[in-house]
Image (tube, grey):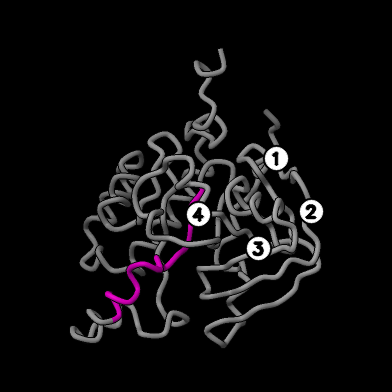
Amino acid sequence: MKTRRIYLTLLAMTTLAMCMTAQEYSARHDSVWVYNSWEAILDQWPDTLVVNPEISVWTPYDIEFEIRSRNANEMLQHQTVAVAVGDTTWLVNTQWFKDQGYKGDVKKMEDYAPLYFNAKIAFIQCVPTRTSNGMALLGALLGDPELFSEDPWENPADYFWIDFESKRVDKIDHKKLSELLSVYPDLQRRFEQMHDYKKRHIIQSFFIDFIRRAERDPSYPYIYDRLYPPQALQ
């Protein structure tokens, strides 16, 4: 395995949709790098380059690619794991997880969504499209700004943990985060002692602390080793 590390781009990362104002936006981009395996992603070694695709941004977390070639479209829909647009924007193919038998919240996702990763951790930022309408109604009834608005461009996004070993994609809520923090008891205690530990901003803040700790921790396993455990390669 190559030892080159990929460092996580956090709040500075800009997705295609962050600067958009309309609910639907279509554009052409000169090139999109295509990655058809996690190994290619981690090694930053793309499988191919797609030139001038049409990019439809339905929401900041639901982005679709279309090419004139039927074979290329089929690849992007089912074979491709992720694409890179420009130097900083990574988008993961949620359909790939479904095709690979992943369970959990990925079944509520559509098309491509923002991907954040380093050599040890990967997660998706998303507002699941299949729950937004019902949650918008619930938020209106309860008057809760933490729930979804009627405008998908204004909906607050959550983080979704990619568990390569269990083949799951799960929302990082307070229960999931406490589970992740169990490897670092001091962080887990601090998180669980917070008065508002169930709030989105508290969860995301401690999740970033977890990422930084894992990145410096030599004992925390790499994604590559979780995808390809030594015993499976023998």
User: Relative to the observer, which residue lies in front, 191 or 149?
Assistant: 149
Asked whether the residues under the numbered discs 4 and 3 touch, taking CB atoms below 8 Å apart as contact, a structural biologist would say no
- Mark found first going from the N terminus, 1 or 3: 1
Label annotation for residue 43: 1
User: Relative to the observer, which residue lies in front, 83 or 64?
Assistant: 64
- Mark found first going from the N terminus, 4 or 3: 3
Alpha carbon separation for disc pair 1 and 2: 16 Å
Quarter of the image where the N terminus is located = top right
Q: Is residue 221 above or below residue 142?
A: above
- Mark found first going from the N terminus, 3 or 2: 2
Q: Secondary structure at mark 4?
A: helix
User: Relative to the observer, which residue lies in front, 187 or 7?
Assistant: 7
Label annotation for residue 94: 4
* Residue 64 x/y as whole percent: 59, 66
* Residue 13 x/y as whole percent: 61, 66
Q: Nearer the viewer, mark 1 or mark 2?
A: 2
Horizontal relation, residue 219 to residue 63: left or right? left
What residue is at 79 percent from the left and 67 percent from the top? 52
Alpha carbon separation for disc pair 1 and 3: 16 Å
Q: Secondary structure at mark 1?
A: helix
